[in-house]
Image: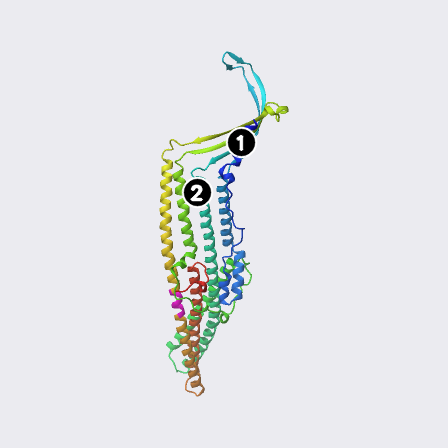
Amino acid sequence: MKKIIIGFIILVILSPSAIAKKKETQPEQEIHYINLSWWERYNDPVLTEYQSRLYEKNPDLKIAALKVREGEKIVKISFANELPQLSFDGQLNRNFKSSDLYFGQMTIPSFKQSELQLPLTMTYEIDIWGTNRFRTKSAEKHLEMVRQDERASYIMLTSAFAADYFNLIRIDKMLELQKQIVDIQEKIVNKTEIKYKNGLCSKTDLLNERKALTYLKEEFNTLVDRQSLLINQMRAYLAMGANEEVKRSDYESVSIPAGLPESFESGVIENRPDYQRAEANIKRAGYNVKVARREFLPKFVIFGQLGFNAYQFSNLFSSPAQMAAAGILPQFDLFTGGRKFAVLKLKKLEYDEALQAYQKAILTSFQEVNDSLSMAHAAAKSYAEEVDRLKYQNEMFDLLTRKSEIGASSNLEVLYGTQAKLMTEKEVVSGKINLLISSINVYKAVGGKDLYKIKDL
């Protein structure tokens, strides 16, 4: 009996998975995907503050983090299946036997008795072919994919929030300019009415000016509506209350990141979460194919029991009541109706699908990087042209003002000139914000990496 017990203990200790140490992981650290160092380049403390709050409050980011934790538990479950399983299956039976039990010519009379069993049962599937190990590796690659999904959520949400934030600053400034334009148009209408009463202009001229006033007021109302929508959307991003104020900086204080790179090396796409996810998916699908192939091979399960078996409580822990058993169970499926062949074919198809998804991720990545960079450079050129146009418009307005001072132009012409200057200022405001949003799109396209830390060609 002692030899059996010792052999059972050695069997558990020397099992391959028991002696194999679990792959050590780094201490769990919270990874910040917000990349505050990049957002600080816009020199807007309100934006930086809100990005931090977004990290703490946004429900979508919390959901993404919970999915990562779920993936970590799946990996632990898969690893646990590689280890020996030890269980306690105690039972108490009361047997009632009739007198129909025969042992040759001998008949056992009717009897009743109790049976007590307190065994520890160990089972372990010897992972000769590495099947369970490949299952765990597949789970680890799935976890890596979920982590890339989390990173993608951070990049998308922070970029979308920043774009809305700058759009809100744009609308604030546009409303300020639009109100001035409406006020000037009202003055123009009043002066045109006086000219009409004095017979200095036609009814058509008056109606045109009134109609222009309605267009300008309609544009003002549209801007107010868009401002309200953006504020509500930002409150949802930040999990704010309905009446909580959404702060933002003035348009004049917002800085444009200078000198966007002209181009990037091709390896810049390797930082994108969709690229890394597709790469991990190929490896995960490859492990699944290996698992499906090894399902055709036989399995060997080590089993053992150690405990006590007695018919009376008083004898339960005595030497005669000790029980021990150990052995190996070979398992091999002779016929499964073609299920294993179908599973293998399915996993191969999934692997081919993962390869195509990887190729698509590469093509999409290059397209988005090139498109965003081209749009950013186009926005920079347009903004430069708009700034020059405003400079010329200001010079024209100065000339018009001096002509008005010497009586060479009317007050109405000065009003038209002021209105034209404000219209040009609106174009400059839009150009500046478009350039800011274009830089955000480039940041998003390269996988949330600081543009000035990427090697320029």
Residue 403, position in %: x, y? 42, 85
Q: Residue at x 45, y 53 (%)?
A: 148
Q: Is residue 140 above or below residue 304?
A: below
Judge by depth and name the residue closer to the eye, 455 or 336. 455
| Pointer 2 residue | 134
Asked if the magenta segment contains residue 52, the reply would be no
3D distance between C-alphas at marks 2 and 1: 28 Å
Res. 211 in view = no
Residue range (magenta): 374-380
Element at badge 1? helix
Judge by depth and name the residue closer to the eye, 192 or 457. 457
The residue type indicated by label 2 comes to Phe
Q: Give the prevailing secondary structure in the magenta stretch.
A: helix
Quadrant in the rendering for residue 201? bottom left
| Pointer 1 residue | 8
Judge by depth and name the residue closer to the eye, 279 or 24. 24
Q: Is residue 365 above or below residue 387?
A: above
Question: Outermost residue, top direction?
Answer: 105
Quadrant in the rendering for residue 113? top right
